[in-house]
Image (cartoon, helix red, strand yellow):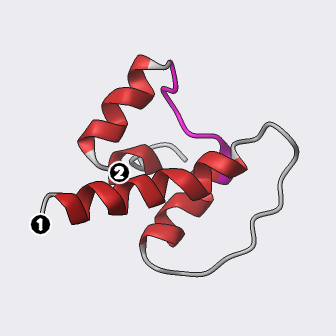
Amino acid sequence: MPGVLSAFTLLNPLIQGVLIDLGFVAPTEPQELAIPRILSGEHLLLIAPTGSGKTESAVLPLFHRVLDKSSD
């Protein structure tokens, strides 16, 4: 999706830094589609091949919310 910000940019800056440090420079297609929807509170069923980033699609928004709550 040229010209569109990565779903990773929606996440807490601490998470973004860790992702960069670990070499995750761009989200996979499932992550790009799921992360914004999960962050907006939408419930969804994500079906994708093994190794495509489904777990991160669910866990990264969870970490984001925990970090946001702890900074309140």
Count residues near mark 2 (Cα–Cα under 10 Å), then give few for <14, some for 14-19, many for 20+.
Answer: many
Amino acid type of disc 1?
Asp
**Helix, strand or loop under label 1:** loop
Q: Residue furthest bottom?
A: 42
- For label 1, the residue is 72
Q: Which residue is pictured at 27% across the width and 38% down the height?
A: 14
Amino acid type of disc 2?
Leu
- For label 2, the residue is 11
* Position in image of residue 49 (x %, y %): 88, 46
* Position in image of residue 16 (x %, y %): 35, 36
Q: In this view, does 10 lie to the left or right of 44?
A: left
Q: Which residue is pictured at 52% across the width and 70% down the height?
A: 38
**Helix, strand or loop under label 2:** loop
Give the quadrant of the C terminus.
bottom left
Q: Is residue 65 left or right of residue 7?
A: left
Stretch in magenta: 23-30
